[in-house]
Amino acid sequence: MKDDGPKGFDLARLLAARGGERYELHTRHLNHQLPRMLRTIGFDKVYQRAEGAYFWDAEGNDYLDMLAGFGVMGLGRHHPVVRKALHDVLDASLADLTRFDCQPLPGLLAEKLLAHSPHLDRVFFGNSGTEAVETALKFARYATGKPRVLYCAHAFHGLTTGSLSVNGEAGFRDGFAPLLPDTAIALGDLAALRRELERGDVAAFVVEPVQGKGVHAAPPGFLRAAQELLHRHKALLIVDEVQTGLGRTGDFYAYQHEEGVEPDLVCVAKALSGGYVPVGATLGKDWIFKRVYSSMDRVLVHSASFGSNAQAMAAGLAVLAVMEDEETVANARRTGDLLRERLAALVDRYELLHEVRGRGLMIGIEFGRPSSLRLRSRWTMLQAARKGLFAQMVVVPLLQKHRILTQVSGDHLEVIKLIPPLIIGEPEVDRFVRAFTAVMDDAHSGGGLMWDFGRTLVKQAVGNR
């Protein structure tokens, strides 16, 4: 589209002129399957603005965000303290990223993060969760001199090549081989961990304390026992807190739910950004960093061009300050317990509702095979077409009828994952539970638009085979 207006860059003017083309622009120039998918399930909304835990469309309708940008928006959108910090750092005109000096902000953010991690000593800053994991994998291999990393089935640690090598889902890995020689075990399987360690070539075990795919927590005692096994075999424990960290599960880190767990390397990202500037961090023990950076010749052996940039560091410092001032971790624990209890009370009421699980504000709602013949036949029809369609049937009316954004927890899973901003409270819990109850009532009535949409999904699933 030709623009003959005034010269110079005017963001507001550009959005006013071209914002309506958003879906067409994606179709032409980006991932063309994204707009196709959004239109198929009726998620092709146009959101005009956002604040806290809500979006608004052009008509002024509000939408409750129970997804938080896959966990990025831990403080909700456009928190005023984080916004001010970014304005301040831009206005300061710092001599940023000279590469040959030591700016104060990275050291200050590292100091604040390590205050929540008293057994860890140093931090490497990158730009994302997958970079934080890549760093941990490299550091573990170099520090131990061993090549292999163990991970869990159904794990998700990122999509760059190293992180993909410890991704426990075949759908993400297919077509990208060869990957690194890493090995999967089942979450909680100490016997399998011991067998692999006895081969003598394992550098580390990387694990999510609560798996994002399906929202499965490590069994009680598993992380501590795994840590002891690993150290006995001179291997390291890497804990991936990219989604679970910074208060998500009701403690600063999810591994802190289990006494005595002190990982050798910890990966964080997502919420540390404040939703503005991408940032990832790998925290580790002093001896690991000193082995990697063993001489001045190796000072840049692992680095990131935009790592430790001033805007990201300012955002991270502001996020941690807000978390302390507003007691975000305690709110996540309190509100998460309330939401989980309210939802768990519905399990006996609805035969399609199988289980509610999770920690803090990371909650999984799992659906299962109903007992009544009438519902069972419909469930079987959906399962035959593609597992996960019923969960999608719940997500869609939550948005379309109740203006609540959620997600299915993973491909071929009948699980909805709730990871809302950590600032939500009882009003948002009430709104979600009311809407979810209405959707469950509709599903169990056996008719209506919900099952009509289910038939549409079946046709789509069969057509894509």
Image (spheres, rainbow, N blue to C red):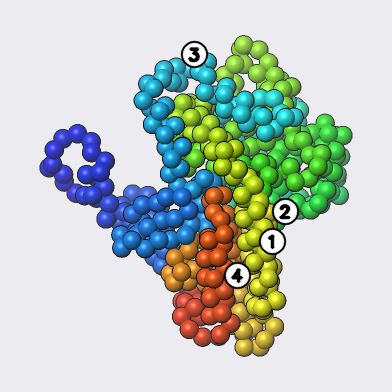
Q: CA distance from mark 3 to mark 1?
A: 49 Å
Q: Amino acid at mark 3?
A: Phe
Tag nearer the camera, 2 or 1: 1
Residue sitting at 49 percent across and 78 percent down? Answer: 450
Q: CA distance from mark 4 to mark 1?
A: 20 Å
Tag nearer the camera, 4 or 3: 3
Q: Secondary structure at mark 4?
A: loop
Q: CA distance from mark 3 to mark 2?
A: 43 Å
Residue sitting at 86 percent across and 49 percent down? Answer: 191
- Residue 401 horizontal/vertical position (percent): 44, 72
Quick check: 301 above or below 31? above
Tag nearer the camera, 3 or 2: 2
Looking at the rendered structure, which numbered label has been put on residue 357? 1
Tag nearer the camera, 3 or 1: 1
- Residue 129 horizontal/vertical position (percent): 57, 40
- Dot placed on the residue nearer the N-terminal end, 4 or 3: 3
Q: Amino acid at mark 2?
A: Ala
- Dot placed on the residue nearer the N-terminal end, 4 or 1: 1
Q: CA distance from mark 4 to mark 3?
A: 53 Å
Instruction: Look at mark 4 in the image and give the residue it sits on.
Output: 387
Q: CA distance from mark 2 to mark 4?
A: 22 Å
Is residue 215 visible in the rendered image? The answer is no
Residue sitting at 66 percent across and 78 percent down? Answer: 349
Q: Is residue 155 left or right of residue 194?
A: left
Q: Is residue 432 left or right of residue 198?
A: left
